[in-house]
Amino acid sequence: MIPNVVEGANMTGLVSYLAGPGRQNDHTNQHVIAGSRYVEMEFAGAPLGRQDVVSLARHIDAPRREHDVDCRRSVKQVDAETGKVSYRKVDAGVFHVSLSLSADEGELTDEKWAAIAHDYIDRMGFGATDDAPSVRWAAIRHGLSKNGNDHIHLAVSIVRTNGAKVDLGYSHRRSQIVAGELEREHGLRVLETRDMGVGSRGVKPAEQARTVREGLAETERERLERVVRAAAAASRNDLTFVDAVRASGVMIRPYYAKGSRTEVAGYSVAARPRAGSDPVWFGGGRLSRELTLPRLRDGWGPTSPTVQEAAWRSTRDGTSRVSSPGAASTKSWEAAASQLKAAAERLKSTPATDRAAWTSAAREVAGVYSAWSYRVEGAKPGPLREVSRQLGKIAATPARDATRKPSTSPRLIAAETGMLLMVASGQASSDMAYLMLARQLTAMTRSIIDWKNQAGLTHEAERTERALAATLAAVQPTGAPAAPPAPKTAEERARDRLREIREAQNRNAGHGAPGSDGSVPYTRRRPGPGQGPTLGR
């Protein structure tokens, strides 16, 4: 279950959106499923009309108005160019959180969601205590998301009915902890990446809306992540990294350590804007946790301060040292495949307990897939980008994790391999050379999948397996022997067995099954009140 926390100031606007038709008319059956005492008595279960929405919002927000509570709080800001930290006051009297399941988890009943909502409110400190009353709140349900995720929204006042404010310190982190507790207590799927302390940055609704509006295949941030990850795989230090990013057409700039104009502590990147528009800059950490400059330097190894300073000075003077290597020879591809084969053998001998080495390997392999995606898939990312994304998740350990440390093992994959995949023109000189490289990269990916399973990240492993299978199907060279298929998951094997049984029953009964192959179509319908999810296969 994924919690997404947003703090704001307009309770009426929030409730109006949740109970309204949605930005793309995708809200259905909007209704309150839980809330503070009066909210449940007055609003639960019934459709919400315009006057109901206004009344509900005003009721939840009344304690703040009646006690004239100042709900402003300081928000930290970091200048992407200078690294300077500043604070500004923002109004944050409204706490809004969505709790969302994966699309393949089905749907919960209103009663189950109501119990989860009450538990979340209590665990987050919004409920009544021995010496303080509770806040007012409402949980609203309005159908599945556009991706099929069952979810609810909680609109919560941060002011108790006696005028006291709730402490919202570390609310995002606390929400993750509470979500993990509720997953176990309510029998939901446990989000493994939360337990392992990993995960990539989520896509914001505004970013997704712009992508859909402009007919793009990925958000601007996702494209920049792919470019930066590929450039990192093709680099040995700051100098080659800066040049590789700029050679891809992306703008990059440094930000400096506090009190210095030479020591670079981070960077930000932006796509070139249209005429009359300003660029939108993303720091490396906003793309993905493992793409911060310190993390990248961990993978590159020691670099002299002189080289680092020269690298970032080039972003000001406009110099660049990268040129395309042109068409790659058969020898180049064979050398890259040989290097990957040696890396795959080294990875197999890495102890499963060496988490630093495995996360470092995941980052390197993700980078090579990004370089491959950049070269082959271009502006229409497909299975190569998806494998890179799944591997990037396991590499993204948070900076606060005490177990995060630079791997003591030497770099697995040479920068030349990443550069070859990223910028070399033309295809491999022979199908066999190309296939050799693909097979060694596949072997490394499967080693990481095995480690994921041993580490308890079974769902992450299955998703990576599926992405890898799609990649093998998509990049198979013409006339080349097929690479071995990815092993099926337990769920896929169970479905195959069920299909075989039903086919046999249909043959015995003397009639065909609904599908041309004898399979039974997958159906899904919303459960009625008091029912659990209804899944038919």
Image: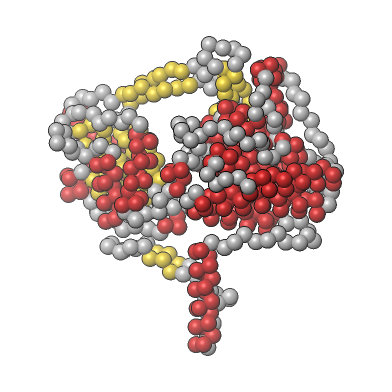
Based on the displayed image, in which of its 4 quarters is residue 484 positioned? bottom right
Taking the view exactly as shown, the residue that stands out farthest to the left is 131
Q: Can residue 512 be seen in this view?
A: yes
Look at the picture and state if 33 lies above or below 278. below
Residue 347 or residue 220, whichever sits in front: 347
Residue 121: x percent and y percent? 26, 42
How are the colours assigned in the image? secondary structure
Look at the picture and state if 115 lies above or below 311. below
Query: Residue shown at 51%/63% (left/top)?
Result: 490
Q: Is residue 273 left or right of residue 536?
A: right
Look at the picture and state if 276 lies above or below 177. above
Residue 195 or residue 409, whichever sits in front: 409
Q: Is residue 457 visible?
A: no
Residue 56: x percent and y percent? 24, 42
Q: In this view, does 240 lie to the left or right of 130?
A: right
Residue 376 or residue 348, whichever sits in front: 348
Residue 272: x percent and y percent? 64, 29
Residue 237: x percent and y percent? 68, 27
Query: Residue shown at 38%/36% (left/top)?
Result: 173
Based on the displayed image, in which of its 4 quarters is residue 395 positioned? top right
Query: Residue shown at 52%/73% (left/top)?
Result: 497
